[in-house]
Image (cartoon, rainbow, N blue to C red):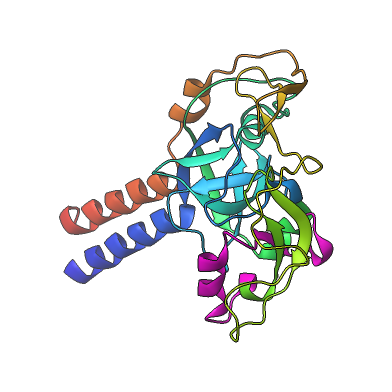
Amino acid sequence: MRCTAHFLTLFAATARASAKTIWATPHESYSSSVGVLGCKVDTNRIAYWPSSVDCNKICVSLSYDGRTVHLLRIDQSEGAHDVSYDAWNYLVTGYSATERPTTGGAVAMEYEDADPSACADLIHTDGNKLPLSASNSMNYLASCLSKDTWVGKNHLLYNILDPICSWGTDELCTLDWPTANQPACPSQLGTPTALENDPVYNIQYMTGNKVMASNGQVVASGGTAITVDLGQKSGGRIARGDAVVVLAMSLTYWLIWGV
């Protein structure tokens, strides 16, 4: 009987892990802790997860209320499971934040790691390779090149200094790894030249306005704001993993005390 109870406890723990329910919160401003360039990816589909950025698991799927999006996991948050505001708004309402912006906090959603190919359309480079800053991504890239990883095999280096592409030169660099640990670029590496032809945009929280990440200037107005009862939608349900755990605990109780 004790073995049966132990098995069900392990089953419950496994079920909870496989459900992968997280509380997603909206994130307004694009960033990347490993130097992924926002001017070459879809900044409206980014995951800002608590764990460090992996060299293989850079793509996740997030689902809520019958809707699913794929997100690039290229930034590390301080603890929250943040999601690009536009992606969060779509999952919660079915509309882009530029069409019908809404406000709210953490919402229970289900996620799972996805193959990087599922995020290919979010990466706007030749071959859908991850665009990295040649001057500020080397620590991350070196860790990916030290073993057999997706990022190690699928990256491009650009002579752009910052993730919001406001400084540097938009040109490809090469890296003779492991002979060299510093990329070679057509221009001098890391020169802080103002870069104006590769703007990165954020979707402003609450308003849905499209604004320049570098200075906050509004370039397009958002749509009509709507109100969604998030408490009723997320708080009134038992997450799938929790439901399995409750069932397993009930079976355990019956097996131990019901015979």
Q: Residue at x 59, y 55 (%)?
A: 35
Image quarter of the N terminus = bottom left
Q: Quadrant of residue 182?
A: bottom right
* Residue 1 visible (yes or no): no
Q: Residue at x 67, y 76 (%)?
A: 175
Q: How many labels sit on residues?
A: 0
Q: Residue at x 74, y 44 (%)?
A: 195
Q: Nearer the viewer, residue 7 or 215?
A: 215
Q: Position of residue 177 (x, y in %)?
A: 62, 82
Does residue 125 show up magenta in the picture?
A: yes
Q: Position of residue 122 (x, y in %)?
A: 74, 52
Q: Quadrant of residue 204?
A: top right
Q: Nearer the viewer, residue 237 or 170?
A: 170
Q: Nearer the viewer, residue 169 or 202?
A: 169
Relative to 3, is 105 above or below?
above
Q: Which residues are magenta?
A: 123-151
User: Residue placed farthest to the bottom in the image?
Assistant: 179
In the rendered view, does 253 fall on the left or right side of 158? left
Q: Nearer the viewer, residue 151 or 173?
A: 173
Relative to 30, is 252 above or below?
below
Q: Position of residue 187 (x, y in %)?
A: 75, 63
Q: Residue at x 68, y 46 (%)?
A: 167
Image quarter of the C terminus = bottom left
Relative to 140, is 230 above or below?
above
Q: Position of residue 169 (x, y in %)?
A: 75, 53
Q: Quadrant of residue 242?
A: top left
Does residue 51 show up magenta in the picture?
A: no
